[in-house]
Image (cartoon, rainbow, N blue to C red):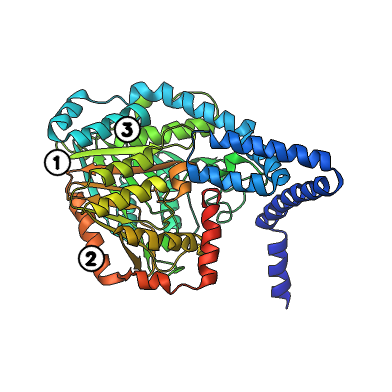
Amino acid sequence: MTKFWKKLANVVFSQRTTIILLLLAQVLFLLFTFFQLSEHSSAIYYTFTVLGLALAVYILNKPQNPAYKLAWIIPLLAIPVFATIAYFILTNQYSTRRVRNAHIKKCASTKPYLRQDQDVLTELDIEDKNVYRLARYVDKYGGYPIYKNTTVEYFRVGEEKFAAMVRELKKAEHFIFLEYFIIDQGEMWDEIHQILVEKAKQGVEVRLLYDGMGSQHLLPFRYDKKLEAEGIRCHVFNPFRPMLSSIQNNRDHRKICVIDGHTAFNGGVNLADEYINRKERFGHWKDTAVMIKGDGVWNFTMMFLQMWEIVDGEGLASDYDQFLPENTDEMPKSAPGYVLPYGDSPLDTENVGELVYLDIINNARDYIYITTPYLIPDNEIVTALGYAAKSGVDVRLITPGIPDKWYVRSIAKSYYKELIALGVKIYEYNGFIHAKNFVSDDKTAVVGTINLDYRSLYLHFECATYMYKVPAVMEVKADFLNILEKNCVEITVHDCAERSLWSRMVSAVLRIFSPLL
């Protein structure tokens, strides 16, 4: 009985409970204000109704995704007082403007260090004009050039990435940069943490950046201070605070590891035991990653430094040249194909992550194979996938059979029937698939952190590795076909029809508000 009360006390007085209660108090205050105004002041209520209508018109004319607009317009028309107050609180805040301005300035000031090699672009123009146009777009509007002389090693599961990462970290001589959405104590992080501490003692510069919400309830309070005391420079991106704020929506969902400027890791694998199947949460956890070596690593080096300096807030720029690779033995002298590591920010007007995906879909001729844990596509993605399938392209999607979030799966299922009717084939993995992969026509692939949902495409900081005519492209394809044959079940129109009325109703309602979830 004593254990029960002790456990209950730990829950009641925990940081998580405090945050939930404070957020709940703010929501209740908004609801109380709504009902008070509705019941006791018709003049104010009608004023807010008019204001809500005006806001709905304003949002309708904003250059935003239509589904995101709809998710706000419906509450503004249905409950104008509550929705109007919530909209002003969530969209007009100094913290959001400050981070946005800092991000714009940092990207502008670092642009000279991310110059596109025009010879590489000229070669690409001759080889494939479609890829040339994409590379030119990402360079000009995303800020990241495309490279040759870069090798890519593909990892089919998190365990493979972990083994390679440990091996490469142990070889570090100058610096280690880590940027992750989730860090959780366990076998994976404990081993990496030990290596980082040892490297810091050897004089290697170690920097760690982790997201304030992704790791909120997984790490001890003020864990960053503990790491600092161990010689690891550490920042928490956008620490989660119990305040209703739009900036809390913008999370750092990236997974980046850079070692000495010559080696980088990217993909869906966070630093927690479920990603390497040392802990089972939703059946077998299928994830993927890549290790790149060579010139293309520089994009990830600069991507990390940009974010680090924004979070650091000191306004100081690094001597970026000091992070160029010194050990040329680790740099390939030549390598087939082209590699484009790129990032995407929610604080600008460019949806780089989505446009890269759309480019692959629109230029596919034979097939497009996609894996994603969260299937909540917007109208542009659905239209592109449907047109590709109707035109004869083999379009296949793999999603989780065991979801980590019930409501996300419920929304995803609302798209199944629509996509199948368009000719898209959908399969469910007999576990949880967290990989975010695109592969098309034996020549193009993307492995990264970008899901097919609104959060990844519009609200999160993301990153990925685009490959063209790199040998690893065929490994991505082979991996897809292997799990398709051995670990997946195809979803049919009959399966969709068997869903209960209640299940379909829940999906329909959740789908309306999916851009805000």
- In the image, 243: left or right of 295? right
Kindly identify the amino acid type of the residue bearing the numbered disc 3. Val
Is residue 186 at least partly visible in the picture? no
Callout 1: SS: loop
Kindly identify the amino acid type of the residue bearing the numbered disc 2. Asn
- In the image, 133: left or right of 428? left
Dot placed on the residue nearer the N-terminal end, 2 or 3: 3
- CA neighbours of label 1 inside 10 A, class few (<14), some (14 to 19), many (20+): some
Residue shown at the point (40%, 68%) measured from the top left: 401
Vertical placement of residue 3 versus 120, above or below: below
Disc 2 from disc 3: Cα separation: 32 Å
Disc 2 from disc 1: Cα separation: 25 Å
Dot placed on the residue nearer the N-terminal end, 1 or 3: 3
The residue singled out by tag 2 in the image is 482
- Please give the label number shown on residue 138: 3
Q: Position of residue 70 (x, y in %)?
A: 54, 46
Vertical placement of residue 343 versus 242, above or below: above
The residue singled out by tag 1 in the image is 336
- Please give the label number shown on residue 265: none
Query: Which one is closest to the eye, mark 1 or mark 3?
Result: 3
- CA neighbours of label 3 inside 10 A, class few (<14), some (14 to 19), many (20+): many
- CA neighbours of label 2 inside 10 A, class few (<14), some (14 to 19), many (20+): few
Is residue 109 at least partly visible in the picture? yes
Residue shown at the point (18%, 46%) measured from the top left: 443
